[in-house]
Image (cartoon, grey):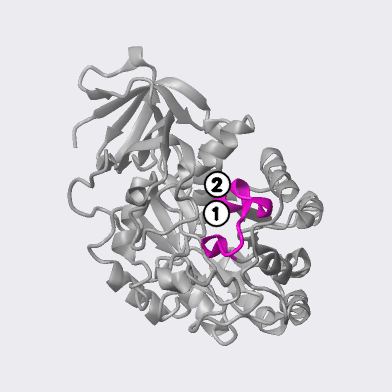
């Protein structure tokens, strides 16, 4: 590929937003230069005042293939990702069948992905009660790290771990040097809450919120931090919703505990006070909490205590959301948002004075680093893959089914008025999404 130059008044680089040109050759970024430094041989395209962001990285996605492709799949998930400005997805070890808890299951996932991916992908392995002897083999086979649940995930094929089982796995994890990602809720407070709600009205969001108390997150995080102090492994708290845990996370980090934290767009955009009864599209675990809690999460992002924002894209067939009866107890808990997460975040962040540089850090650079892919992904910098997004932050739109692109066009964001439109997405210098179309053949590959 000849030297290409992509010009913009607003290139979002690790050094800040600058006017200039992104130089691309053979799928890699060769440099970011001022316009007057543009090589004479470079073939150029000028995006004017449109923003050029690094390709986004989503480190928390449930692609669900193989085994539950009727829920999502590599083809539809990566199509939605490309439309949303993502160029790398890191797939969770559930809800696919088989779960990615063995090398054989990882091989099955790789076979399922062949020829289907519009964007690059990587895989997390799983830690379950009986696979401690698989951990080092999975690491050698190329997983980015490991995911566990401290509470029953509520799906066949992936079991929670007890503290004893986790202790059995941790020496193996430690030898890999890879992070442990944990769904941080424990069962005790949840079980107690459910007993107290035996006669409650489960069409009310307030009932569901009471059923997943903050204490469940706080106790789980406390256990993870204690184990990290004892063993020295890297721990990553996924989808933090409970602001009450922030003080202990802050203290642990100040003491040198190797802990990182993510939250999700839905915890930053919605609040419990605005969720209607029966609106089961908003059900997720942990739950969306109150307005004050939401603002505390934003403050933790501001201070860097929360490192990144990942979608936890967790789709299912619409009938599993129990939309007609509106029952929060029986509805599937998961929110799908891959194709609209960037405008959701920009809408909410810009209102609070955050910048496009924050977006790039939370949604590209830091998740790439978590997944061990930061040398090549998540930045507009020399030597990185030429993955980038043409984004119009001033444009606005109302979310409709045609904006979603994943397998089932249902979302709690339908009808929301959002700021920011993804115009084009490039993977290694080639367009994979442009003005509603997906040019060329699938170019995505596993990123190891």
The answer to whether any part of residue 26 appears in the image is yes
Q: Contact, CB < 8 Å: mark 1 with mark 2? A: yes
Q: Nearer the viewer, residue 337 or 400?
A: 400
Q: Position of residue 210 (x, y in %)?
A: 73, 68
Q: Identify which residue is drawn at 62% across, 67% down.
A: 182
Q: Position of residue 17 (x, y in %)?
A: 49, 24
SS for callout 2: helix
Residue 425 located within the stretch drawn in magenta: no
The answer to whether any part of residue 93 appears in the image is no
> On the rendered structure, is 253 left or right of 359?
right
Q: Identify which residue is drawn at 33% across, 72% down.
A: 69
Q: How many marks?
A: 2
Residue 348: quarter of image:
top right
Residue 381: quarter of image:
top left
Q: Which residue is mark 1?
A: 370
Q: Position of residue 27 (x, y in %)?
A: 28, 41
Question: Which of the image's four quarters has the N terminus?
Answer: top left
Q: Looking at the image, which residue sits at the far top?
A: 36
Q: Nearer the viewer, residue 177 or 240?
A: 240
Residue 268 located within the stretch drawn in magenta: yes
Q: Nearer the viewer, residue 13 or 398?
A: 398
Question: Which of the image's four quarters has the C terminus?
Answer: bottom left
> On the rendered structure, is 29 left or right of 359?
left
Q: Position of residue 385 (x, y in %)?
A: 36, 43
**Picture layout, residue 31 above or below residue 336:** above
Q: Identify which residue is drawn at 23% across, 44% down.
A: 437
> On the rendered structure, is 85 left or right of 258?
left
Q: CA distance from mark 1 to mark 2?
A: 6 Å
Q: Which residue is mark 2?
A: 366
Residue range in magenta is 264-284
Label 1: few (<14), some (14–19) or many (≥20) C-alpha neighbours in 10 Å: many
**Picture layout, residue 112 above or below residue 31:** below
């Amino acid at each position: 590929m000849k030297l290409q130059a992509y010009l913009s008044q607003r290139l979002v680089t690790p050094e800040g937003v600058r006017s200039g040109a992104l130089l691309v050759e053979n799928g890699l970024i060769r440099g970011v230069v001022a316009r007057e430094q543009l090589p004479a041989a470079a073939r150029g395209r000028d995006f004017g005042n449109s923003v050029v962001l690094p390709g986004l990285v989503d480190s928390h996605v449930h692609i669900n293939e193989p085994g539950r492709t009727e829920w999502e799949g590599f083809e539809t998930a990566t199509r939605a990702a490309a439309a949303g400005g993502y160029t790398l997805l890191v797939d969770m070890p559930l809800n696919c069948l088989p779960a990615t808890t063995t090398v054989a299951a990882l091989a099955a996932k790789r076979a399922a992905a062949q020829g289907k991916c519009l964007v690059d992908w990587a895989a997390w392995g799983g830690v379950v009660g009986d696979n401690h002897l698989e951990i080092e083999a999975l690491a050698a086979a190329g997983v980015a790290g490991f995911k566990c649940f401290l509470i029953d995930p509520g799906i066949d094929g992936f079991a929670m771990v007890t503290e004893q089982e986790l202790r059995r796995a941790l020496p193996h994890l430690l030898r890999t040097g890879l992070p442990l990602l944990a769904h941080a809720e424990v069962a005790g407070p949840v079980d107690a809450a459910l007993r107290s709600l035996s006669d409650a009205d489960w069409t009310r969001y307030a009932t569901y919120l009471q059923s997943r108390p903050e204490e469940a997150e706080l106790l789980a995080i406390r256990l993870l931090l204690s184990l990290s102090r004892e063993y020295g492994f890297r721990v990553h708290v996924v989808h933090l919703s409970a602001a009450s845990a922030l003080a202990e996370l802050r203290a642990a980090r100040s003491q040198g505990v190797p802990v990182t934290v993510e939250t999700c767009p839905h915890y930053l955009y919605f609040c419990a006070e605005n969720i209607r009864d029966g609106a089961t599209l908003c059900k997720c675990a942990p739950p969306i909490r109150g307005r004050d809690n939401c603002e505390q999460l934003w403050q933790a992002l501001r201070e860097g205590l929360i490192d990144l924002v990942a979608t936890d894209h967790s789709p299912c067939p619409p009938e599993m959301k129990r939309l007609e009866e509106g029952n929060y107890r029986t509805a599937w808990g998961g929110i799908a948002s891959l194709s609209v997460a960037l405008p959701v975040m920009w809408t909410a962040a810009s209102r609070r004075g955050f910048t496009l540089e924050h977006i790039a850090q939370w949604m590209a650079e830091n998740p790439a680093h978590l997944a061990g892919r930061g040398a090549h992904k998540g930045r507009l910098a020399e030597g990185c893959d030429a993955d980038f997004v043409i984004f119009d932050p001033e444009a606005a739109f109302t979310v409709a089914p045609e904006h979603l692109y994943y397998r089932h066009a249902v979302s709690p964001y339908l009808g929301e008025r959002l700021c920011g439109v993804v115009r084009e997405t490039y993977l290694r210098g080639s367009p994979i999404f442009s003005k509603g179309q997906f040019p060329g053949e699938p170019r995505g590959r596993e990123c190891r």
